[in-house]
Image (tube, rainbow, N blue to C red):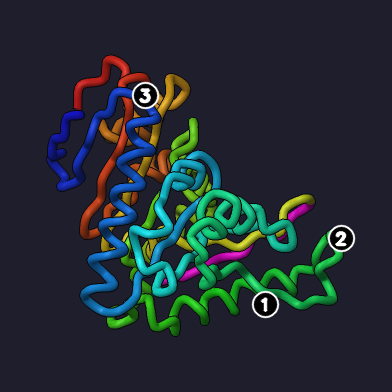
């Protein structure tokens, strides 16, 4: 494992493989949770779905006072609740975490049928209100600030639900907290780039040979405007975790 500082203040840590990255993520979540609980009595963790959450299955039930941990999501499919289910299966059940906050919307629409647009807007507004008022989240500034945000990175450089050239990534800086996506086959809410940047600490994990182009573009700056959302995540402390396969022959 080697760590270096990038010119823009981000740090880059290169691990042997994805298993080593997963082990470090477990250590980081454990340390951050204990530090926040010691300092203020609670811990706010925001997570995606996918391999990043799967890595947290090794969290220890005895390592943290999990009753003081609050879990939020970078995005969620309304009604399907895939991010919520992944978190429950990976570590929340095991660690007996009860404060797991997924988007709530009218029970009338919890049938699996397509949602009307106003239901997505309502769910978006409700999650925004939750993030702006929850006592575990620092709202002393203009935007909610999580203690720790974990992100995966897609092959195309997307993170969370922010995709290259999308209207939502182009809107970065407008103060949006969450946004809704309402289209055929996809009813979703997600946090904005502004909220990602407001987090106290962000870790972006990106492993495997398929991610090497995303890593190269994100770390080098070699992309068109709005073309690599993950590269635009620059919080107070922003850490990139890659493995040898995803770094490939790129020299930061």
Residue at 65% of width from left, 53% of height from top? Answer: 82
Location of residue 183 by image quarter: bottom right
Residue range corresponding to the magenta coloring: 175-184
Q: How far apart are marks 1 and 3 (CA)?
A: 39 Å
Q: Does 215 lie within the magenta span? A: no
Residue closer to the observer: 41 or 108: 41
Is residue 198 at least partly visible in the picture?
no
Q: Is residue 138 visible?
A: yes
The residue at which mark 2 appears reads as 113
Return the mark for residue 246. Answer: 3
Tell me if 16 is positioned left or right of 190 in this view: left
In percent of width and height, residue 156 lies at 49, 33
> Considering only order in the chain, which callout, 2 or 1, is on the residue closer to the N terminus?
2
Q: Residue 122 carries which label?
A: 1
Is residue 122 left or right of 23 when viewed as pictured?
A: right
Q: Is mark 2 on a helix, strand or loop?
A: loop
Which of the two residues, 83 or 237, is positioned nearer the viewer here? 83
Which structural element holds mark 3? Answer: helix
Q: How many residues crowd mark 1 within 10 Å: few (<14), some (14–19), many (20+)?
A: some
The structure residue drawn at horizontal position 32% and vertical position 17%, both measured from the top left corner, is 248
- Determine the secondary structure under disc 1: helix
- The mark that comes first in sequence, 1 or 3, is 1
Characterize the magenta stretch by its predominant secondary structure: strand
Which x, y percent locates residue 148? 33, 60
Q: Are marks 2 and 3 in contact (CB under 8 Å)?
A: no
Q: In which quarter of the image is the C terminus?
A: top left
- Please state which of the two labelled residues, at mark 1 or mark 2, is closer to the viewer: 2
Residue visible at 26% across and 45% down in the picture: 239
């Amino acid at each position: 494992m080697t760590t270096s500082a990038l010119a823009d203040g981000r740090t880059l840590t290169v691990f042997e493989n994805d298993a080593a990255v997963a082990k470090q993520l477990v250590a980081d979540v454990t340390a951050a949770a204990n530090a926040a609980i010691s300092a203020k009595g609670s811990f706010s963790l925001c997570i995606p779905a996918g391999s990043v959450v799967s890595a947290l299955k090794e969290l220890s039930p005895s390592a943290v006072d999990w009753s003081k941990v609050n879990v939020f999501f970078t995005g969620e499919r309304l009604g399907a609740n895939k991010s919520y289910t992944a978190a429950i299966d990976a570590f929340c059940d095991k660690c007996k975490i009860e404060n797991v906050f997924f988007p709530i919307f009218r029970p009338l629409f919890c049938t699996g049928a397509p949602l009307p647009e106003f239901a997505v807007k309502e769910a978006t507004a409700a999650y925004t209100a939750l993030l702006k008022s929850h006592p575990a989240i620092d709202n002393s500034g203009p935007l909610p600030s999580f203690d720790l945000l974990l992100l995966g990175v897609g092959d195309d450089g997307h993170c969370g639900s922010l995709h290259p050239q999308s209207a939502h990534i182009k809107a970065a800086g407008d103060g949006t907290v969450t946004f809704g996506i309402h289209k055929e086959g996809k009813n979703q809410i997600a946090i904005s780039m502004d909220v990602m940047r407001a987090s106290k600490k962000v870790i972006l994990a990106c492993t495997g040979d398929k991610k090497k182009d995303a890593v190269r573009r994100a770390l080098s700056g070699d992309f068109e405007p709005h073309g690599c959302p993950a590269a635009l995540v620059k919080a107070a402390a922003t850490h990139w975790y890659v493995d040898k396969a995803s770094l490939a022959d790129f020299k930061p």
